[in-house]
Amino acid sequence: MAEGITTLADLPFHVSGRYPKSVLIRRCRAEAADVTELSSREFFEQVRDLSLGLGALGVEAGDRVAILSESRPEWLIADYAALTRGAVTVPIYPTLPEAQVRYILADSGACAVVASDESQAAKVRAVWPELPKLAVLIVVERAPDAAPTAEERGASAAPTAGAPTAARREELSLVDAAARGHRRLMDEEGLGRMYKEAAAAIPADRLATIIYTSGTTGEPKGVMLSHGNIVSNILASDSVISVTDDDDALSFLPLSHAFERMVCCLYLYKGVTISFAESLDTIARDLQGVRPTTLTGVPRVYEKLHARIHDAVAQAPAVRRALFHWALGVGGDASRAARAGRRAPLTTRLQLGLATRIVLSKVRERLGGRVRFVVSGSAPLDVPVAEFLFAIGVPVVEGYGLTETAPVLTVNPLEAPRPGSVGVAVPGVEIRIASDGEILARGPNVMQGYYHKPEATAEVIVDGWFHTGDIGRLDDDGYLTITDRKKEIIVTAGGKNVAPTPIEAELKRSPIVAEAVLIGNRRPCITALLVPDFAALAHELGTPAGAEAREEVAERSDVKERLEAVVAAVNADLPRHEQIKEFAALPAEFGIATGELTPTLKVKRRVVEERWSAAIEALYAQ
């Protein structure tokens, strides 16, 4: 391992010693005066004090500490406070309902929870009586009158042998928990030195975290990742993604997801200033406030940016539309030449300066104007969207991985990217394709296994190779292309195999299609559920924009005619057995709260099919 870091517990010491910055971490808020800023020293001190506070509350090495919070500085502080104590952190998406929070807390055996606010704390209080191992609830933004009664804490529940009793359960604020640690530091001689020595003594193979996969199907599984798993991925990613302590990163994906969490670990390792967006809804505002040099996102974020810009251009006068498309063409020609390692024609080079000055630079301002590159992960990025980003002068680094691989397996090298592929294996990782097309991976980042699920572990790790469940192909240069999910291949009643993802991606290229889900497993033909982009339709057709009118919009004949044209255009390039015979326009957007999307905006097919079963049956009745 590299000097200064062998485990995640080393990171707070590493960043405070090597990168003494006045602003290391900040959080964007609605009011500029509310912006939270932490220096490298303040970050370290808050991690140390909370870690010692956790010790005062009875948290020991190996104990599980859950984090139920949106992304914010306190998420990282809680994570590293637990990790430097030798405890195991269990991230929980704040969008999950009580029942799923209870499942994760119970399955992991968490003894403590750090919740961001009263709404998240309420979920824990509601299920606390069912969790005999849960002893401590720490609330970041705790209401002064939020202290629960003994009955609310579950004091009437019968304690199990060896577990903390309800009477010993405690709820307090994050400030109070850290204050307990700081008092210990002042009162116990040599405690600071012992804290550092204990953190340094944590072995790389010790379990660091259990991350429950949100999953598009089935029950969540707890992925066990060691310190070594994640640190190996940090160092491998560092060798292919160039960031420095001069960079400013905007973070808006959930830290509960392995992708953003590892990226933030890399940022800390390299001394990058991390700014957390207030929420997903404030990204556009926070981009202007932070003016980042890099950011990470999932494809849907970039797809929305692409669609919104093209939608705005479509409403512009003819001259501006022509100018935009000319500039985009020039930028695309220049980008493709550079990526091919050749010099662009002289005319292109001459035109690029003008195109950049009058059009492309203004488009880049939507991302703050300083972005050197962006990173896309979690799902394949549509090629036209990637090409658009390159054309406007924002290189995109697309990678691939899974929670089970800590998570990065491949990255498209910035100096030789190939849109449509997810790049080449990062150092230390091996990739091969099984006889049925499944992608297999091996390396030091592959998980220890699924918590409490040895059978499930044995199914996916065979002879040291992790079976990803994704279908793909490798070219002669080692670039990997994902074609579909193995379990999502549709097999029609006629025995024909249909890969839905590429077809859905083609449908979503239309600015009026927000989501598309193909149906057809064990059915006579392929059909589709389409979620219109209601905002785009309002611009194009003058339809009502309000949520209350969406059912009316979905039934309008002019909307159906536009969607029919989109489907027909996609069908024109498909073999007969893959063509969409019927479609339904759905009157509501997919959402995380309704269960149709994972927290990283992946569609949960099973949930969609259950919720819209009546619409599906109506399609086949036709």
Image (spheres, rainbow, N blue to C red):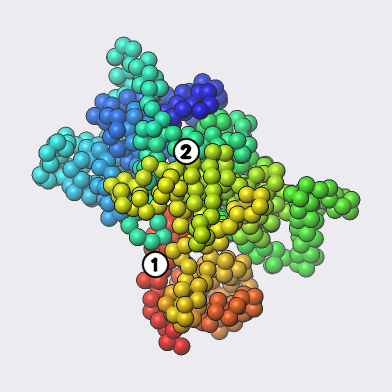
The residue at which mark 1 appears reads as: 606
Extreme-right residue of the structure: 346
**N-term-proximal mark, 1 vs 2:** 2
Q: Position of residue 291 (x, y in %)?
A: 62, 41
**Residue at the bottom extreme, as displayed:** 622
Residue 210 image offset from top left, x and y in percent: 36, 42
User: Nearer the viewer's eye, disc 1 or disc 2?
Assistant: 2
Left/right placement of residue 332 relative to residue 521 reads right
* Residue 569, x across and y down, in percent: 64, 77
* Mark 1 secondary-structure assignment: helix
> What residue sits 40% from the left and 49% below the top?
461
Residue nearest the observer in this picture, 94 or 92: 92
Looking at numbered disc 2 in the image, what kind of residue is underneath it?
A: Pro
Check disc 1: other Cα within 10 Å, few if <14, some if 14-19, many if 20+: few
Q: Which residue is mark 2?
A: 444
Q: Looking at the image, which residue is at 79% across and 64% down?
A: 322
Q: Quadrant of residue 114?
A: top left
